[in-house]
Amino acid sequence: MTHILAIDQGTTSSRAIVFDGEMKIRSSAQEELPQRFPDSGWVEHDPGDLWSTTAGTCRAAIEKAGLGPDDIAAIGITNQRETVVVWDKATGEPIYNAIVWQDRRTADYCRKLRDAGHDKMITAKTGLLADPYFSGTKLKWILDHVEGSRARAKNGELLFGTVDSFLIWKLTGGAAHVTDATNAARTSLYDIHKGRWSTSICELFDIPLQMLPEGKDCAADFGTTRPDLFGRPIPILGVAGDQQAATIGQACFEPGMLKSTYGTGCFALLNTGETAVASHNRLLTTIAYQLDGKPTYALEGSIFVAGAVVQWLRDGLKIIRDAAETQPLAEQADPNQNVVLVPAFVGLGAPYWNAECRGAVFGLTRNSGPEEYAKAALESVGYQTRDLLEAMQADWQGSGARATLRVDGGMSASDWAMQFLSDVIDAPVDRPQVLETTALGAAWLAGQRAGIYPDQADFAKGWALERQFSPQMDAGDRSAKYAAWKRAVDATLRF
């Protein structure tokens, strides 16, 4: 048994990747995951889709690899964070759709929390803000709006989980109700300093503690799969939220190391070691990973819309048919136009944290067309990343003024986007040979727990650079373009 099955359940798709004993990809399978938008700012998944696409891609990946169940030593799971599922403990049936991390329906409640001064207590315990992004207020919304659900939860009839917990429950046939420290840390219900659920916050939200999962290290025994799923029980030995898994996959194990993942959203994490650095610039203090009972902390900046802006070009404006068309369009854009797109489709994340503002485009001329929109879309990701990095540098001097940024995720494959990113942040951008760093991180957690992958130090030595992008933009141009971005954001926030 020398292979690891990594489950990567994301916002827009579910994937399964089989890694061999050398941590190389043997096979993969992917299935798109439908999203539902029942109201303005609302985003949901059918939990049945979460499960069916995960189970289906797992079986497909094992089959494509030409392997049998006896070849799989363990399973590692990484998942979209903050997304909420509540299900019946007896039947496993969800009582409502999964409310996705992008969903903003609890903005009014979060405003009331801030007005009442509760946000300071929430931030002190969890490192997070009183914002709809996080799981706690989503869970409260379900208990408030699904008739009889709070009483059932208090009677021990309902369970709550982020996507990892729900998948483990399904994979184990209801034998395990667990999560890991990184996913727990994103709920706004978990005290990251004491390593346990916060009784005071659960009481504030009126959430029964008995419906919450047991928290574990990222590499731990999370249960074994039902024998009928894959032909034999397979242990689940690694779990981490997607951005933390990418941090692990990028081998950002030393304080000061920095990675940014470009998927549906963009998430930059800065390893701060044993110190939970309190942000003064509206970043998040979170757990990067937890091994052997010891948490390693990080500062995180979260951008809600990165790759999703390219999806908008495709599905909303219909000016492209495939994401790969964005780069050649951007290369053809008129250099004399400075179109700025603020993709606040579901509000703005760090460091602005405004749930109510919506997207805007500035600088349009009569000649603006698909090329300028494509360029502005890719540039918006670079600008938002600079916002995060400047906040990190202000919060923690150990981050350095020009720390190299390790990148991954779908958009990192675009040379144009990564070169602009390097230009606008005025720092090197390193792209690894293995772009599937999120799945790799989950696989390594499970594989080293199973005894077939190297320890942390040797894993870090194996990180390999594919290409480094260095700043080439004139300093004056960089300053002017970023100033235009800041003006556009200011106008968007004021609208």
Image: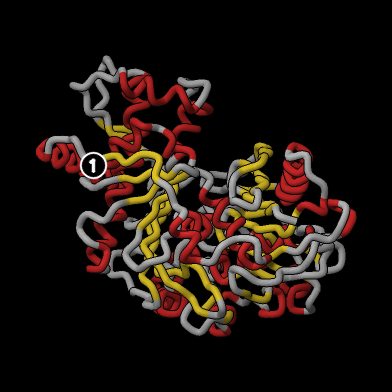
Q: Is residue 30 visible to the viewer in this orientation of the structure?
A: yes
Is label 1 in a helix, a strand or a loop?
Answer: helix
Q: Quadrant of the C terminus?
A: top left
Q: Position of residue 190 (x, y in %)?
A: 54, 76
As drawn, the residue found furthest toward the left would be 476
Q: Nearer the viewer, residue 420 or 46?
A: 420
Q: How many marks?
A: 1
Residue 205 placement: quadrant: bottom right
Residue 276, how many percent across, how many down?
A: 38, 76
Q: Position of residue 202 (x, y in %)?
A: 58, 78
Residue at 59%, 51% (x, y): give it: 23
Residue extending furthest top? Answer: 367
Residue 495 showing in the rendered view:
no
Quarter of the image for residue 116 reads: bottom left
Instruction: Check the image and report above or below for 129 versus 462.
Output: below
Q: Residue 286 is drawn in which quadrant?
A: bottom left
The relative height of residue 491 versus residue 477 in the rendered view (above or below) is: below
For image coordinates 68% across by 73% down, the residue present is 213
Residue that appears at 76% across and 44% down = 62
Position of 359 compared to 207: left or right?
left
Rendered residue at 22%/28% (across/down): 338
Is 234 left or right of 281, judged from the image as shown? right
For mark 1, does the 10 Å Cα neighbourhood hold few (<14), some (14 to 19), or many (20 or more) residues? many
- Kindly identify which residue carries mark 1: 424
Amino acid carrying mark 1 in the image:
Val
Residue 408, how many percent across, how many down?
44, 45
Q: Left or right: where does residue 461 sit relative to residue 236?
A: left
Position of residue 118 relative to residue 179, above or below, is: below
Quadrant including the N terminus? bottom right
Colouring mode (rainbow / by chain / secondary structure / one colour): secondary structure
